[in-house]
Amino acid sequence: MEISKTNSEFLHSLLSEPTPTSYEIGGTRIWDVYMEDLGFKREYQDKIGNSGWSIGSGGQKVLISAHIDEIGLAVQGISDEGYLTLTSLGGIDPKVLPGAQVIFLGKNRVKGIFCKAPIHSEYYDKKMDSVLKLKDLRVSVGADSREEVEKLGIEVGSLAVFSRNIDVNFGENKIHGNGLDDKIGVYIVSQIARKIKEFSDIELRHKYTFIFLSGVQEEAGLRGLEVAAKNINPDISIDIDVTPALDGECGVDKSIWGDINLGKGCVIEYGPDKSRRIAGVMKDYAKLHEIPYQLGVSSAGGTNTSAIQMSSTNCETMLVSIPNINMHTQNEICDWRDITSAIEIISGVLNEDLI
């Protein structure tokens, strides 16, 4: 996929900025500058950090959203020897943490490394098959005492994220980095906004108000969009998030979890909080225009779609997902072909007034 230098720089900036859930301010500033520079109107913002920009003046509100927060960690304790214990902000699998590098946020950004007991001692202590828990791990910031840690500006409550490791041109079609869940969704929202601004006609803009929203605190329990949806009260919403791609996952039964793969198109989702009507419109549009797509089924409650449905007065909700390998790790992988298909399908059905 050809992406302009400007768009590529915007995406790289989003991914580079740490946005642990509940502290997304840096990423939101990048989003706000980008949307303002494109000429959109400030439509909505709130005290917890949701940020919406709009085009159009119609009575029907169409919300296109994604969440900018990523999983994070917070300091829970500091030992006299200078090691830290952390608690998770969002779902983190402790198995991926030993040896992982993190960045502590604050006045100074400080590197930390997760430490665990060596495999040798686990063998002799007969703990080889035990389930690793976050409380079993410690983090070193290179300090020898609690005092040294505190001099670095780290205290109980300090936040951390995985160290940045980003490549927007990974191989021919892939992208990898931290926080693709769900900054890739925020990027897609911005590009849908560009296409609507470029191709929508005056009649469409008089009929609808299109609101493009970067949400917060999804990883903390769908808190951000619960607040935003209640205040915006949209008539239709389309949320963009990620979903596990299973082509790179070993030992997963696809007959149970679905056969979702990288590079075969975005996922048009079915489920209790997804509109079958809108899903059908998207599927028909994709077929007509030969845009690749996949179908998925997900229960209600795992994404902001559920929060929007429950918090709005009378909103028809829809979810489109981007396949993601290594979700909630320091190296998530997505595919540009899936990203492109989401932008084309969603912007197409909106610009042609098919919803």
Image (spheres, rainbow, N blue to C red):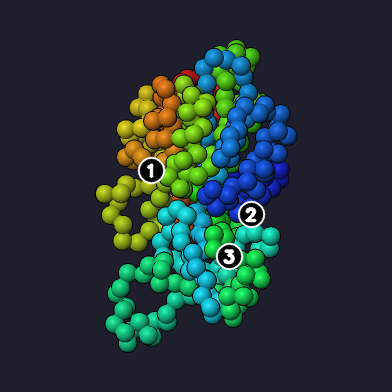
Q: Residue at x 44, y 76 (%)?
A: 116
The quarter of the picture where residue 273 lies is top left
The reply to whether the C-beta atoms of the residues labelled 2 and 1 are less than 8 Å apart is no
The CA span between labels 2 and 1 is 25 Å
Q: Is residue 270 above or below residue 27?
A: above
The CA span between labels 2 and 3 is 24 Å
Q: Which mark is residue 16?
A: 2
Q: Which mark is residue 302?
A: 1
Q: Residue at x 47, y 55 (%)?
A: 89
Instruction: Look at the image and tell me in which quarter the N terminus lies.
Output: top right
> Which residue is nearer to you in this view: 186 or 290?
186
Element assignment for label 2: helix
Ranked by sequence position, the earlier of labels 2 and 3 is 2
Element assignment for label 1: loop
Q: Position of residue 94 (x, y in %)?
A: 41, 65
> Which residue is nearer to you in this view: 231 or 3?
231
Disc 3 residue type (three-letter): Glu
Q: Nearer the viewer, mark 2 or mark 3?
A: 3
Q: Which mark is residue 331?
A: none
Ranked by sequence position, the earlier of labels 2 and 1 is 2
**Callout 2: 10 Å neighbours few (<14), some, many (20+)?**
some
Q: Classify residue 65 as left or right of residue 257.
A: right
Q: Classify residue 48 as left or right of residue 133.
A: right
Ranked by sequence position, the earlier of labels 1 and 3 is 3
Q: Which mark is residue 155?
A: 3
Q: Is residue 327 above or below residue 3?
A: below
Q: Position of residue 154 (x, y in %)?
A: 61, 66
